[in-house]
Image: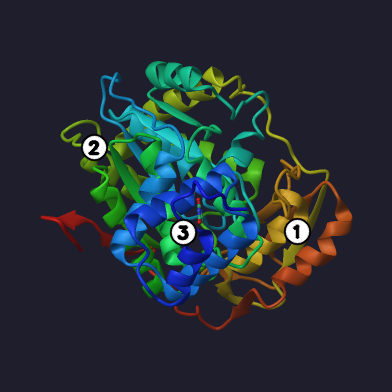
Amino acid sequence: MNTTTEPFAAVEVIAAKRDRNVISDPMIDWVVDAYTRGIVADEQMSALLMAILLNGMNPNEISRWTQAMINSGERLNWSMLKRPTADKHSTGGVGDKITLPLSPLVSACGASVPQLSGRGLGHTGGTLDKLESISGWRADLSNQEMLAVLESCGAVICAAGAGLAPADKKLYALRDVTGTVESIPLIASSIMSKKIAEGTGSLVLDVKTGSGAFMSDPERARELARTMVQLGVAAGVKTVALVTAMDVPLGLTVGNALEVRESVEVLAGGGPADVVELTLTLAREMLAIAGISGGKDPADALKDGSAMDVWRKMIKAQGGDPDAALPVAAHQEQVLADRDGVIANLDALSVGVAAWRLGAGRSRQGERVQAGAGVEIFAKPGDTVKKGQPIMTLHTDTPERFARALEALDGGWSVGEKTAPRMPLILDRIGSQDGHIN
Ligand code: URA
């Protein structure tokens, strides 16, 4: 469906990328805008996305594509806030509940945290699904409500409104059904268009790598991280990326309410060592990049209860009851060690798929998730176990799901003589200095 008043025809743009040519700035501006307006049809955009996936884009094309997606909607502005803004984005992983303790923690140390988050799709969980297991908590806030929570609590975690990068919403849904998600230019522009439009002054990216991550190969994860840092810096957002491990689930819980419980443990000064270490590392990066130095150290804000105070206030401000008991699934089944030894491996993807099949995640947009479903882990790689000792407990409201969850775990963990090699928790840090990404 093209009209004579349009400056380009979609086929011209598709053919240019198909033939490995650079698509010009006006072409990019037009095709993103025309697709958002419904002038370029889904089948034409599908062809273009596939050509981009196969033939790539140069840095200027990626930057222009990102800007065109930002221009498709509103750009939020937090300049009225008294404190610098800092945000974090994770590319998603299994048991990755870091946003929950991190946002109130960074607020307790002096930055404002406008955190727009998403829902889970597939085996990786979504921050909003986790928080919705808290009785009464509301993800959908107007811009005015978001500002009010930010002003009163210093941190807000909520859903991105429909006005933010609408081109990305349409494009992401199309990529999901056309096998075009796994393109670095498309992933980087999708994530960064939303983060830049969200209006944060500084951004720390947590790019996951390993079996449970989008980018299982560390080199591809580094490339994605570099591309996103470049886009952030070019748009005037101070941006740093950490490449972090997702070969083993993060912490000891995977699933919505289970992960809220663990996050509250971290805010109370406890919690698993890997979750605490990553939370503190990201918090220090966010404070440094926001230009906040010499204030309270994040480790102290976990110990003295100030991060917990912000959490409680933030949950209440969004209608939630921080004291309400968290939902517990109706049925449990234990997975036991089959011999004496050490846990040799515990594969993030297997555990993520098991939690998903138990009802913690959704397979279609809009599906309801079970708040109590998921996997609780009692032993991680390197831990010594005895035959018959519980390794995991599976939780669900629908016990017919146990068999498929157990299938997902088959071969995903083992007890042996020694631990298989593991990734370090933090593999790399990518920032920018004097215009160079390093
Ligand atoms: N998350 C996004 O927002 N976009 C992508 O393309 C991938 C992950």
Answer with mark 1 or mark 3, whichever residue precedes in sequence.
3
As helix, strand or loop, the secondary structure at mark 3 comes to: helix
Is ligand 1 closer than 8 angstroms to the Cβ of mark 2? no
Q: CA distance from mark 2 to mark 1?
A: 40 Å
Is ligand 1 closer than 8 angstroms to the Cβ of mark 1? no
Q: Dot 3, how many residues are within 10 Å of its Cα: few (below 14), some (14-19), or many (20+)?
A: many
Is ligand 1 closer than 8 angstroms to the Cβ of mark 3? yes
Residue at the location (47% across, 50% down)? 32
What is the three-letter code of the residue carrying label 1? Arg
Q: CA distance from mark 1 to mark 3?
A: 26 Å
Residue at the location (41% across, 63% down)? 185
**Residue 258, quarter of picture:** top right
As helix, strand or loop, the secondary structure at mark 1 comes to: helix
Q: Which residue is mark 3?
A: 187
- Determine which of the numbered discs, if any, sits on residue 357 in the image: 1
Q: Which callout, 1 or 3, points to the residue nearer the camera? A: 3
Give x and y (percent) for residue 50: 54, 69
Answer with mark 3 or mark 2, whichever residue precedes in sequence.
3
Q: Is residue 419 above or below residue 71?
A: below
Residue at the location (44% across, 23% down)? 309
Position of 430 compared to 244: left or right? left
Count of marks placed on residues? 3
Circles 2 and 1 in contact, beta carbons < 8 Å: no
Q: CA distance from mark 3 to mark 2?
A: 25 Å
Give x and y (percent) for residue 319: 60, 19
What is the three-letter code of the residue carrying label 2? Ala
Give x and y (percent) for residue 333: 80, 57
Position of 415 compared to 99: left or right? right
Position of 329 compared to 71: left or right? right
What is the three-letter code of the residue carrying label 3? Ile
Answer with mark 2 or mark 1, whichever residue precedes in sequence.
2
Q: Which residue is mark 2?
A: 290
